[in-house]
Image (cartoon, grey):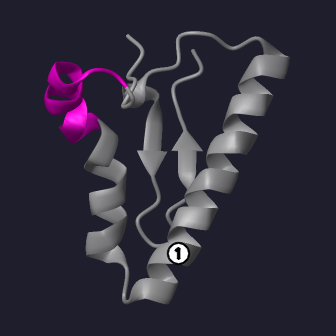
Amino acid sequence: MRVNCAGNLASMILLKPFCTYYREALLRRAAGPEAFFAMRANFAASLAAVCATNYVAGIGDRHLQNFLLHEATGTLVPIDFG
């Protein structure tokens, strides 16, 4: 299932918890605005690296249950490659 936050109003209301989950988790764990922006940058960089690596390696079946969020740094950690 692909989550698209830019859809119509009904789908945006239904999918809002999925689209804001990581943002809210990072906001709760950040000590301040600077820490939040650093965590968000770490998340974006690690997501890009994981996506590129999975594409090159041909790893399929990626869904939200295959990722962990490192709470201290905001880094995305892929799991379950078997």
Disc 1 marks a residue whose amino acid type is Phe
Quarter that holds the N terminus: top left
Question: How far across and down, in percent of the image, does residue 76 sit?
Answer: 54, 49
Residue linked to disc 1: 37
Indicate left or right for 33 with 58 as reference: left
Q: Which residue is drawn at 49% across and 63% down?
A: 74
Given the current orientation, which residue lies at the most extreme right position? Answer: 56
- Foreground: 9 or 63? 9
Give the secondary structure at mark 1.
Answer: helix
Q: Which of 69 and 5 is in front in this view?
A: 5
Q: Does the magenta stretch include residue 17?
A: yes
Image quarter of residue 56? top right
| Residue range corresponding to the magenta coloring | 7-18
Residue 12 pos. (x, y %): 23, 29
Q: In this view, does 68 lie above or below 29?
A: above
Q: Residue at x 37, y 66 (%)?
A: 26
**Above/below status of 45 relative to 74:** above
Q: Is residue 65 magenta?
A: no
Apparent side of residue 4 relative to residue 48 in the rendered image (left or right):
left
